[in-house]
Amino acid sequence: MFRRAKLMLDAVDPETVESAVASGLLVVRLGLTDGRGQPLCAAVRPPAATGSAG
């Protein structure tokens, strides 16, 4: 059985996106389990995923 998590990049802060475009790097961090300790799946948005520019 396979699960997938979709990173919703449209939820990344616009200032972070601008910095990422300038630097050429966007880093998104997320945990791989949900609040019950099960594998993370479905759409992942902040605060479960956080973006930063490199």
Image (cartoon, rainbow, N blue to C red):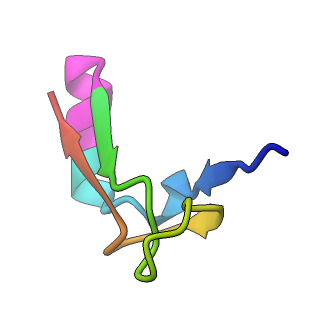
Query: What percent of the width, then of the height, locates residue 52?
Result: 19, 44
Residue 17 lies in what quarter of the image?
Answer: top left
Quarter containing the C terminus: top left
Q: Residue 20 or 48: which is nearer the viewer? A: 48
Q: Left of 41 or right of it: where is 53?
A: left
Q: Is residue 41 above or below residue 51?
A: below
Q: Main secondary structure of the magenta part?
A: helix
Name the residue furthest bottom. Answer: 36
* Range of residues picked out in magenta: 18-25
| Residue at image point 40% right, 81% down | 35
In the picture provided, is 12 more to the left or to the right than 39?
left
Residue 7 at x, y percent in the picture? 55, 52
Note whether 13 is above or below 18 in the view shown: below
- The reply to whether the magenta stretch includes residue 21 is yes
Q: Is residue 42 above or below residue 27?
A: below
- The N terminus: image quadrant: top right
Towards the viewer: 54 or 17: 54
* Residue 12 coordinates in the image, percent (x, y): 38, 59
Residue drawn 19% across the image and 36% down it: 53
Q: Which of 28/33 is in front?
A: 33
Left or right: 15 in relation to 3: left
Residue, x 53% and y 68% (percent of image)? 38
Residue at point 36%, 69% (across, down) = 48
Q: What x and y, as percent, mark residue 49?
A: 36, 60
**Residue at the extreme right of the image, as rendered:** 1
